[in-house]
């Protein structure tokens, strides 16, 4: 081979070697590039996180407030039903029915003197007394109809106790006994944003357990429907009085003062505070009655409770007397978690 060709061949081999060397990376260069890629990936994740935090979450976007409330409502009703269904497996299990409360301080503007005078004609009723209500129910049968429905026996007792009237031996001024049998039907119909969570049909007896001129009693068929919308609840409870003979009727004009049903509006406030207003009366006669309740968490499962009543129908003995009553004390079962919206 001629020297010129040999020289040319060596030059070509050298250029090829330089080209390959230029395209190859050293270990140090590779580590530097991989480190840079990892750094960029970390920065990208950080930027995506900031973008996600600045954008409404998918939960809020997909599930509106109304749907979230409905889910919470369904969970609350389901928990209540689970507790009530204990009676199916335990015949001695009872659950709360209406509110259970104790008002150690209850001031009444016009307490009835009739019951006190029956004990001692020389002693007047104190305006300051103690009031309490106990209410419970237990299940008799479940799934009455293909669409559901459970049968219950319920009992409610409200007492006005002259606990501080030692001159009259601290008698009970009035006690109202209210046994009833009712069928409960859970529901989830929604109309204009309001969900009808349950309906109740009850045969109700109410009396004060007395005889003669102080006897008060009546029987009713009551249909109660409860609707909720976010933190609001409305309970409609129209009733029909079972007719009695004139000789057996202790209070023939009671509808003239208390009307033909109760309407209750309740509102949840500040998380677990509750306010409710119950209205009853007969608009045609101008006789009305209203009760305001406010409760809040106090300690454990005990709640502070304020109750104010004004008008007719506060008790059976005073159904035809307009009174002002203000009470302060404690209650146990909140309206929204128990599913009840009645007095």
Image (spheres, rainbow, N blue to C red):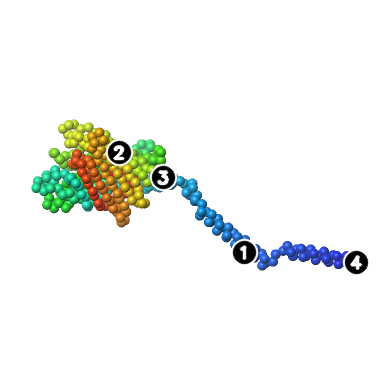
Which residue matches tag 4? 2
Residue at left 15%, top 40%?
Answer: 214
Q: Report the quarter where the N terminus lies.
A: bottom right
Q: Residue 302's image quarter? A: bottom left
SS for callout 3: helix
Which residue matches tag 2? 237
Q: Is residue 335 visible?
A: yes
Q: Report the quarter where the C terminus lies.
A: top left
Relative image position of residue 76 (x, y in whole percent):
37, 47
Residue at left 89%, top 66%?
Answer: 4
Distance from the alpha carbon under mark 1 to that under mark 2: 73 Å
The answer to whether mark 1 and mark 2 are in CB contact below 8 A is no
Which residue matches tag 1? 35
The answer to whether mark 2 and mark 4 are in CB contact below 8 A is no
Distance from the alpha carbon under mark 4 to that under mark 3: 96 Å
Indicate which disc, 1 or 4, sits on the residue closer to the N terminus. 4
Front disc: 2 or 4: 2
The answer to whether mark 4 and mark 3 are in CB contact below 8 A is no
SS for callout 2: strand
Which residue matches tag 3? 70
Indicate which disc, 4 or 3, sits on the residue closer to the N terminus. 4
Task: Give the residue furthest to the left.
Answer: 122
Distance from the alpha carbon under mark 1 to that under mark 4: 51 Å
Front disc: 1 or 4: 1
Indicate which disc, 2 or 3, sits on the residue closer to the N terminus. 3
Indicate which disc, 2 or 4, sits on the residue closer to the N terminus. 4
Residue at left 24%, top 36%?
Answer: 286
SS for callout 1: helix
């Amino acid at each position: 081979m001629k020297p010129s060709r040999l020289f040319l061949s060596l030059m070509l081999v050298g250029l090829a070697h330089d080209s390959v060397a230029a395209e190859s990376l050293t270990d140090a260069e590779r580590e530097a590039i991989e480190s840079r890629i990892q750094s960029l990936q970390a920065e990208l994740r950080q930027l995506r996180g900031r973008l996600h935090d600045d954008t409404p979450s998918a939960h809020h976007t997909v599930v509106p407030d109304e749907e979230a409330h409905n889910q919470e409502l369904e969970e609350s009703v389901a928990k209540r039903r689970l507790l009530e269904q204990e009676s199916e497996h335990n015949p001695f299990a009872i659950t709360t029915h209406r509110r259970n409360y104790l008002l150690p301080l209850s001031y009444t503007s016009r307490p009835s003197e009739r019951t006190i005078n029956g004990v001692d004609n020389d002693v007047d009723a104190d305006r300051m007394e103690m009031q309490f209500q106990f209410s419970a129910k237990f299940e008799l049968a479940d799934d009455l109809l293909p669409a559901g429905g459970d049968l219950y026996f319920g009992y409610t007792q409200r007492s006005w106790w002259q606990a501080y009237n030692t001159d009259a031996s601290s008698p009970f001024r009035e006690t109202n006994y209210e046994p009833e049998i009712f069928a409960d039907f859970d529901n989830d119909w929604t109309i204009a944003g309001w969900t009808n969570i349950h309906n109740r049909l009850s045969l109700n007896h109410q009396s004060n357990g007395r005889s003669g001129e102080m006897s008060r009693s009546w029987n009713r068929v009551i249909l109660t429907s409860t609707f909720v919308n976010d933190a609001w609840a409305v309970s409609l409870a129209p009733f029909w009085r079972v007719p009695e003979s004139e000789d057996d009727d202790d209070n023939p004009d009671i509808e003239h003062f208390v009307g033909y049903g109760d309407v209750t509006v309740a509102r949840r406030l500040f998380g677990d505070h509750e306010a409710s207003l119950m209205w009853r009366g007969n608009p045609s006669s101008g006789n009305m009655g209203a009760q305001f309740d406010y409760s809040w968490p106090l300690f454990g499962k005990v709640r502070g409770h304020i109750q104010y009543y004004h008008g007719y129908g506060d008790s059976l003995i005073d159904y035809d007397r307009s009174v002002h009553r203000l009470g302060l004390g404690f209650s146990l079962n909140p309206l929204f978690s128990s599913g009840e919206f009645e007095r």
